[in-house]
Amino acid sequence: MRTSRASGSMFGLAYGDALGAPTEFLDMRQIRQRYGDDGPRELAGNPALVTDDTQMGIAVALGLLDALETPPVTPDLITPMWRRRFVDWLVSPDNNRAPGGTCIRACRGLSDGRPWLEATQHDSKGCGANMRVTPVGLVPGLSDEERAGAAQLQAAMTHGHPTGLAASELTAFTVWWLREGMSPADLPAALRERAHAQRTAYHERWLADLWARWGVKTPEDFISYGWDECLGILDRLDAALARPDRGADPCEATGAGWIAEEAFGTGLLCFLLFPDDPVSAIARGAASSGDSDSIACLAGAFAGAHLGMDAWPAAWAGRIEYADKLARIGSAWD
């Protein structure tokens, strides 16, 4: 029996992040010269340092733990808690890992006291929307509406583009379904079904009038744009899985990962190419020509949710940065 799937997912996120960070701005020739055809497979440093991907994932998780002290989780409850955690990240001396400009600009607005609807970057669907959403997929006991609304809200606080919201929801549900035992082979069809079912579902309770600031006529017009782009990436994922190439740059199939739907699709592709070999999954994400740390961190989150903590090399848990926080978060939801 696979156990400690929440811990496996949170640590997997960090492992992928740390493995992919040194390759983020290298091309495939440089990566192969430095690490060989299989990519990096060992954590570097002690501690092995992570990036803003893991830091912000921890921020989302800590906000959720705060909110769960007085359940249920509602937008009125969780929004100020996430604001505080995002601002804490903004001013942390550890926030020196080349963080994304969208997150920085939005969090500065939050720090200045602006409502998140004004602070968010409305035209951005960067991968910062969903690189940090894994904890929303690990919390037990949420309804589908609560999980979807929370996933979209944490994205919307910095990335106001509808595709960032839809990709974040799909990322969170992938983690949740894997944690609950769904077969990896069943994921693409389940994700496509959810995308179609939710295509015109706007979570007004969580998002207020975000849609009205995007220059469209209806909330349905707003959110369907994001779901349609995510359906496009699922088409590319299906095509890649129909002819799997475990040695190729995954970014050639599903995109470089700088934007939310591509980070989701390429991270998921790396996992699905190696569903029972988590180190190979994150190594494939790290050995890619795009946003390798974000791709590998999502692949690691998926792999850990599927396989549990024991699937990772035992020695890594004591070497990864923020191990104490990751362990606290994982144990809360295991």
Image: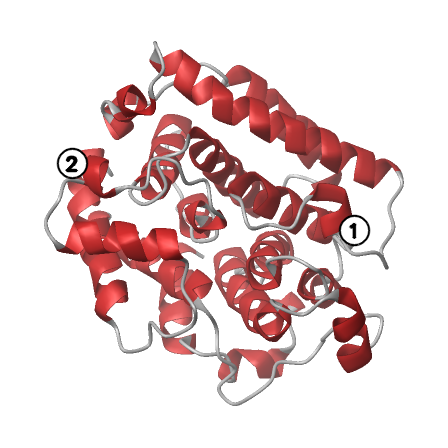
Which class describes the residues within 10 Å of circle 1: few (<14), some (14-19), or many (20+)?
many
Res 66 visible: no
Q: Tell me which residue sits at (77%, 33%) in the image.
A: 238
- How far apart are the alpha carbons under marks 1 and 2? 40 Å
Res 330 visible: yes
Which class describes the residues within 10 Å of circle 2: few (<14), some (14-19), or many (20+)?
few
Q: Earlier in the sequence, mark 1 or mark 2?
A: 2
x then y, percent, for residue 312: 64, 70
Q: Tell me which residue sits at (37%, 75%) in the image.
A: 96
The answer to which of 31 and 18 lies nearer the viewer is 31
Q: Tell me which residue sits at (36%, 68%) in the image.
A: 328
Q: Secondary structure at mark 2?
A: helix
**Left or right: where 321 falls relative to 187:** left
> Which residue is the site of mark 2?
76
> Which residue is the site of mark 1?
273
Q: How is the image coloured?
A: secondary structure
Residue at the limit of the structure toward the left, as seen here? 113
- The C terminus sits in image quarter: bottom left
x then y, percent, for residue 93: 27, 78
